[in-house]
Amino acid sequence: MKVRTLMLGWEFPPFISGGLGTACLGLTKAMDRLGMPVIFVLPKAKPVHLSGGSVPVFESDSPGGYAFRNVQFRPVAAALNPYATTRSGTVATVAEDLTKANLPDDDLEFGEPGNYGPDIYAAVARYARKVLTLGLTEQFDLIHAHDWMTFPAGVALAAQSGKPLVIQVHSTEFDRSGEHVNQYVYDIERHAMHAAARIIAVSNYTRNIIISRYGVPPQKVEVVYNGVEHQNGSWSGQRQTWPSKSDKIVLFLGRITMQKGPEYFLHAARAVLEKIDNVKFIMAGDGDMLYQSIELAAQLGIGNRVLFTRFLRGDDVRKVYQLADLYVMPSVSEPFGIAPLEALQHDVPVLLSKQSGIAEAFRNALKVDFWDVQEMANKMVAVLRHPPLQGVLRSEGRREALKFRWEDSAARMNEIYHQMLGVA
């Protein structure tokens, strides 16, 4: 039996702000290749280019684009953007939206949005209302919801349809906010975790957080690692001005937020420059700590050695990997981490935070506690000074990265679906 999945997401390439969109594309393409029927509900914040009515072609993925055969997309009028910086709307209007969406909100407390976008509560409820309406006209066997912004929609649709809910946790509120959690977001996550029939965690690191911080029975949580696309197509984007390649290049690529540890990277960078002169550091990304990080680089006296590129797309992503001698992921809390696998595809050795999901599953990388900036710097220096070490990390790391395949993730997801539904 083929399980027909109604999948709920909040971002999808080419319009992405983080790793979730990359993960959704990789998993969904693999499910498509395995013949798994999926209806993907996507908030329409920007134009969605469709071919043949409901089949998108993503020109950035390959020269000829990728046309889905078993996946249909359903754009809905809702804008889920968690990273905006201003706010309008009130808690009262959000509560009204939740009531109109017929969402279970008795366990939820409304707090300030913190790092989240201006109308995020209302947008989450608006998306849920659209999903409930859509659910009345679609045929599906189960619901698969990605991350907290789609969880209220998933819980409500499961109650309306009687179909089981699977939620996939790519990041928790503890990853994003540390101990200063947004109570509203935490309550949404906890409510969905207890309402779901099965929870998919992207690593044992995340599974342990779900069990210990949300009180979820261990037998309810499955681990399915992310993969990486192993065929790179054509990329497009505006070109950047890059440092001279006579310098060694150390790369940070990710959102510049508390979760990603940019300040630890910069402190380590200063320690590196005390030992090696011809090194420059690229910080590629946007986030609420961007300007704070620029100021910190200046305060540390290394502002002229750090290039802040903002968010990169297309050719510039490939170019920055090609320039890099080392990729560093100093995350404070990283559920998985796809970027190191992408770096290795471009023959860039990686240094990983031990506080990450990929670190538990990957052997051929250097690893360090995010807070140990001196050891982080020592390992950066070792790679930059010793070409044999760099070569081994490149070759063995690239070989190991080939083991992380989206097809394996999709196949495991299919097994979980069938086990949960009790069908062959």
Image (cartoon, grey):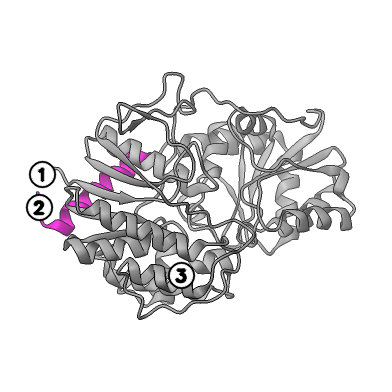
Q: Name the secondary structure under disc 3.
A: helix
The secondary structure that most of the magenta stretch takes on is helix
Pick whichever of labels 2 and 3 is earlier in the sequence: 3
Q: Please tell me which residue lies in front, 188 or 324.
A: 188
Q: Is residue 336 left or right of residue 28?
A: right
Answer few, some or many: residues within 10 Å of disc 3's Cα (few below 14, many 20 plus, some between 14 and 19): many
Residue 204 visible to an observer of this rendering: no
Q: Name the secondary structure under disc 2.
A: loop
**Residue 8 position within the rendered picture, expressed as x and y whole percent measured from the top left:** 34, 52
Q: Is residue 130 left or right of residue 22?
A: left
Q: Is residue 64 above or below residue 109?
A: above
**Residue 374 position within the rendered picture, expressed as x and y whole percent measured from the top left:** 76, 59
Q: Please tell me which residue lies in front, 8 or 373.
A: 8
For this orientation, the residue located farthest to the right is 301
Q: Is residue 406 above or below residue 329?
A: above
In the picture, the quarter occupied by the N terminus is top left
Pick whichever of labels 1 and 2 is earlier in the sequence: 1
Q: Residue at x 29, y 54 (%)?
A: 144
Task: Please name the amino acid that badge 2 sits on.
Answer: Val
- Residue 20 is covered by the magenta coloring: no
Q: Which residue is mark 1?
A: 1
Q: Residue at x 40, y 39 (%)?
A: 26
Q: Please tell me which residue lies in front, 277 or 150.
A: 150
Q: Which residue is mark 3?
A: 94
Please say if the residues under marks 2 and 3 sit with CB atoms less than 8 Å apart. no
Q: Is residue 369 above or below residue 140?
A: below
Q: Name the secondary structure under disc 1.
A: loop
Q: Which residue is mark 2?
A: 423
Q: Please tell me which residue lies in front, 186 or 53.
A: 53
Q: Which residues are magenta?
A: 404-424
